């Protein structure tokens, strides 16, 4: 099974200069061949990786591009691979047309395809024979084969991502004994059918207020001055800290969810419809739902758990989880509502997570040993796969019964 791990590295000043050279040379090669491929296509000539590789060899022999020889040749070839992949994704309609890379991009990176080794203190890659100091927070599996590494820089902070094969197979899905429904919303990150609320606002609230102060100070700096450049760097470092805090919290809660439950049903929503709303655009922008789904997907897969994504058109907020009646559409400011048929009062988000759980359990096939009356899932008062119970959480808050 192919997996990856990211480490913080601490290069010396000379190594930082060489890393920046790699960033620049890889960017030059990518942009040059993106323009070259466009011109060749206009003349009816189709370029492949191998034809561009021959052109790259001739390009490095030119006096204007002699500086490309100072960097690892395989990293330059990986830039061509990335360009080919970008065009393949475009023609398969998985991505937009490739853009030119900019040196003003806050994240710069280059790939190293082979000759990578790692010990307890340093990582060794081509052109860095003395090794780069690394902080090992998690060791690699024994007898693993390192396939590739990517060195990146964000806000003057350097990282290396190591991709390796650990010779382990993906486990088969476990028998479902405990299931949960998850509802994503704008107010909180997640709410479970077991009344657990996950919210990252407390983790980054102090950093967000500090960011606003720094941005106000930046607006008063003179354009082109050194003080403005220093303010830009402070803001970039703080943005990086906020992103790291969010990622850390996402890893913690996804680990907790995938460890506690065998079946996870996740309801999705259309965030694009909220971008135009001035009051909600900040919440939508800060909520990285794609990263949350990606973490839940791969962690559930390697642990043998089952993850089901519920379509955004499923009316989870409209169905009463007590009697199954349709209570109609609800506005975003309505936190609680009373069912007109059974007079039961519900928390809107908790009610949605319960409906998501029941709907997902009604859709699973007979390979899972779960006793479910599929004709009654979602309209009965009892939960399928056992009654939902309040569980303890290290990273979430329990929703009180009156909320």
Image (cartoon, helix red, strand yellow):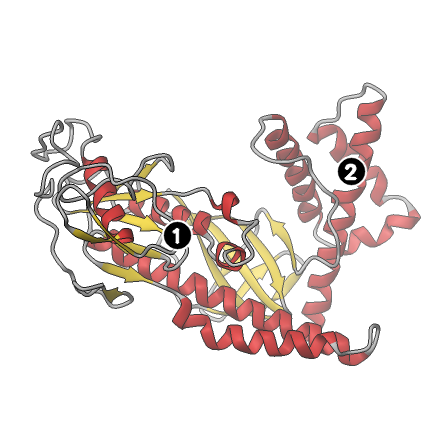
Q: Nearer the viewer, mark 1 or mark 2?
A: 1
Q: Image check: 191 left or right of 18?
A: left
Residue drawn at the location 10% of the way across and 35% of the way down: 370
Q: Which mark is residue 43?
A: none
Farthest residue to the front: give it.
340
Q: Earlier in the sequence, mark 1 or mark 2?
A: 2
Q: Secondary structure at mark 1?
A: loop
Res 11 visible? no
The C terminus - image quarter:
bottom left
Pinpoint residue 142: horizontal percent, then vertical percent. Answer: 35, 55
Q: Image check: 275 left or right of 29?
A: left
Q: Which residue is mark 1?
A: 332
Q: Which residue is mark 2?
A: 33
Residue drawn at the location 19% of the way across and 65% of the way down: 400
125 or 169, nearer to the observer = 169
The picture quadrant where one finds residue 109 is bottom right
The picture quadrant where one finds residue 386 is top left
Q: Image check: 106 left or right of 140?
A: right
Q: Secondary structure at mark 2?
A: helix
């Amino acid at each position: 099974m192919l997996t990856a791990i990211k480490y913080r590295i601490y290069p010396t000043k000379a190594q930082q200069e060489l890393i920046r050279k790699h960033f620049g040379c890889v960017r030059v090669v990518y942009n040059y061949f993106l323009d070259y491929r466009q011109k060749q296509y206009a003349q009816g000539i189709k370029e492949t990786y191998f034809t561009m590789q021959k052109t790259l060899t001739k390009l490095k022999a030119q006096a204007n591009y002699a500086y490309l020889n100072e960097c690892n040749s395989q990293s330059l070839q990986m830039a061509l691979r990335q360009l080919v992949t970008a065009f393949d994704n475009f023609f398969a309609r998985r991505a937009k047309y490739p853009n030119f890379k900019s040196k003003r991009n806050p994240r710069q990176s280059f790939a190293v395809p082979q000759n990578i080794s790692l010990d307890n203190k340093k990582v060794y890659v081509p052109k860095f024979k003395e090794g780069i100091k690394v902080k090992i927070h998690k060791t690699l599996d024994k007898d693993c084969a390192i396939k590739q590494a990517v060195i990146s820089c964000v806000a003057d902070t350097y990282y290396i991502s190591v991709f390796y094969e650990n010779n382990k197979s993906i486990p088969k899905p476990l028998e479902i004994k405990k299931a949960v429904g998850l509802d994503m919303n704008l107010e909180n990150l997640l709410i479970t059918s077991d009344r657990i609320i996950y919210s990252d606002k407390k983790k980054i609230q102090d950093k967000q207020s500090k960011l606003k102060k720094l941005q106000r100070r930046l607006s008063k700096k003179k354009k082109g001055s050194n003080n403005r450049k220093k303010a830009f760097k402070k803001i970039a470092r703080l943005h990086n800290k906020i992103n790291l805090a969010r990622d850390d919290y996402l890893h913690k809660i996804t680990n907790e969810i995938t460890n506690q439950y065998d079946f996870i049903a996740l309801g999705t929503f259309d965030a694009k419809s909220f971008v135009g709303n001035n009051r909600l655009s900040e919440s939508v922008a800060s909520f990285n739902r794609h990263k949350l789904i990606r973490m839940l997907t791969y962690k559930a897969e390697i642990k043998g758990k089952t993850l089901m994504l519920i379509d955004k058109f499923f009316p989870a907020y409209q169905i009463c989880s007590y009697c199954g009646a349709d209570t109609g559409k609800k506005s975003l400011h309505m936190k609680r509502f009373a069912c007109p048929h059974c007079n039961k009062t519900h928390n809107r988000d908790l009610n949605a997570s319960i409906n998501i759980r029941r709907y997902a359990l009604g859709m699973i096939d007979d390979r899972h040993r779960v006793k479910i009356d599929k004709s009654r899932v979602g309209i009965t008062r009892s939960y399928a796969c056992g009654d939902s119970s309040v569980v303890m959480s290290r990273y979430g808050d329990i929703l009180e019964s009156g909320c």
